[in-house]
Image: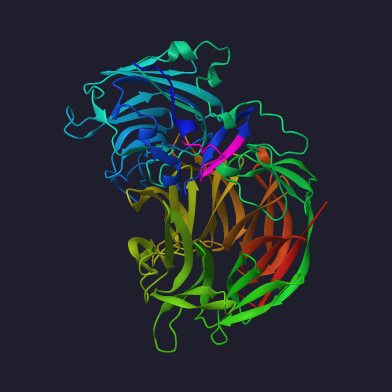
Amino acid sequence: TDLRPLDILSEAVPAGGLARGMRVFQVQGLRGFQLAASRPRALGFPASRLFIHCDRFPEEFSIIVTLRVLGITAKVSTAGRARRGHGPARRAGVSRALPQRNEYIFTLMAEENPSVLVGLRYAPDKLHFLFWSQERAGGWQTRVTFHNVSLSDSQWHTLVLAVSGQSFSLTVDCSIPKDVVVETPFPASLSVRRASFYLGNRRRRKGVFTGLLRQLVLLPGADATPQICTTMNFKVAMLSVPTILLDVPVKPASNEVLKYPYETDTKVTLGSHPRCTKQEKAQFWFNASRRGLYLCNGSAWVSMLEVKHRLDYVEEYQNLVTNSETMGIEVFTIPKVGLFAATANRITPPGSAIYKWTDGKFVPYQSIPTYQAQSWKYFTIGKKIFLAVANFEQNERGQEFSVIYKWSRRKAKFIMYQRITTHSARDWEAFVIEGETFLAVVNHREGNNHNIDSVIYRWNPRTGLFETNQTIPTSGAYDWEFFTIGPYSFLAVANTFNGTSTKIYSHIYIWLSGSFQLFQSILTFGAADWEVFHIGDRVFLAVANSHSYDSGMPVPSNFYAINSSIYELNITAQMFVKFQDLPTYSALDWEFFSVGDDSFLVAANSFDGLTFSVNSVIYRWQGYEGFVAAHHLPTVGCRDWEAFHTAEGSYLLYSSAKEPLSKVLKLKTT
């Protein structure tokens, strides 16, 4: 048997440089290939280039891999189907975990068949070896799984997989081997005729390896462990590595550039806020406006060096005259166009308006006919830009629609795109789950009936329209709030009134098996808004309670002086538990924002039982003390708060539901 190592990774690299879809990165002093998902076929080559004299895969062999898997953040293990129970306070149990992501290190596939002949696949804490056995398994693929293989620590690791008949052995960093014996042996005669190797994929974009590959070698006829485990640094033991990845490059002559240029994990980006994903991990961003240097940790920019700002006081910056009383505001940015604010105004005509931030102020930009509009929602689908309005009343023809508008780049304004039948709509929420876009509407009431269905719509890319996907029973609902925790998606509804009482349960739903199912119920009092936010690794959910009314109970001294509550996710209890109560006066909205390292919540207090001229309050996060009142802001019938940032500073914008005047406030820092 020819024991010459067959270097799969080197074979994929053209003699003159890199294949399309490959980049070289240097991390922790070692280089590896990063593979792009956009061109999976470009990362393949015919197996005949390795198997020159024989078109059969070896019966006994070892596979040697040196790789660096991107670190995987902690995920909340709170999934389960809603259980039947008694009373409205039941919540979902936890019965099973959701499937984890799989990434292919390599595959061998026949041209005419989508099945994997031989492959190596990694999932969190598992390594799967796949092979096709026509004789013993009826043409089905066999999977050999090695459990408790922890590679997701962003470190380099070397794996040796030895295969012989029914025996499979995995050695990680020359530690104690993990041995598995299966019923189906590796085939003695596996044809590789008209088959190809694919690096980091299975000829599809899904499941592409996102880490770095340094070594991928097939050694026929032998257990390679004794050859590999002779070096002091077991994690980067080397049998055969492509020339381009060798640690010490050939020194260029005079001003000649390197023959094989590479990228290190130390890059500095300038300009506006860049994205921070696994691809940008360990890169730097210099924010000139804030004079700060930030490091991408794979999901967020972490301050490394920054001029620390602290909120000193709030000053009035702009009086924004609106068409009529404003029920809600949406602040958004259209790339390469600018910053905008859409106001949901009560009276029609003239309807609602969109304002553009120009020379440090919001100025009128576009008027849109609406019918007692309650809120706007900005969202994108690919390169398409949309703005949805929730209309509370019927139009002139007695029709009740809420409308989705689409941004026209040619006309530089929003034009009507799709009308959807709604019932006294209060709110829209847009979100993406598993690559699909959804739009959820809150239906408040139909006639005098408050106990009706709210609807979740799914975007159909074929028709280019939103179509009904799921209905959820709600009671006089005001608000949807979508959020994710690890791999899990949640949707919370603020139920306000069931026809007789505001003391009712609002619900949190979890996405399972293609639909939202009940996860937890929380008793609320005229709930008008949910706000989810993170402080460090902690997850909070705040509810704005608007008033306490029950037709069957004695009248309270004040319907509107009532606590609003903050809940915190307790992973052990697998539910949100009450963290803090804050006194509010008919609160209609919460808005979370940050200044420097400090976190804040501002409450929209609208009515104290006597007057609409009520102070709204900014609460500062103070750790063990929770949120503590820091600033009291005079407002009139405050309905909504929006925080936004420009190059000139940070601002708060509030809408008044009782006068045609909203205000922009500037946060003054020290």
**Residues drawn in magenta:** 12-25
Residue 461 is situated, as x and y percent measured from the top left of the image, at 38, 64
- Is any atom of residue 288 visible in this view? yes
- Is any atom of residue 175 visible in this view? no
Q: Is residue 334 above or below residue 523?
A: below
Among all residues in the image, which is located at the extreme front?
A: 53
Among all residues in the image, which is located at the extreme right?
A: 670
Q: Report the side of 361 relative to 98 (left or right).
A: right
Residue 382 is situated, as x and y percent measured from the top left of the image, at 49, 61
What residue lies at 68% left-to-right and 58% top-to-bottom?
Answer: 617
Q: Is residue 535 above or below residue 631?
A: above
Residue 72 is situated, as x and y percent measured from the top left of the image, at 51, 35
For residue 17: magenta? yes
Q: Report the side of 345 relative to 381 (left or right).
A: right
Q: Magenta: predominant secondary structure element?
A: loop
What residue lies at 53% left-to-right and 26% top-to-bottom?
Answer: 241
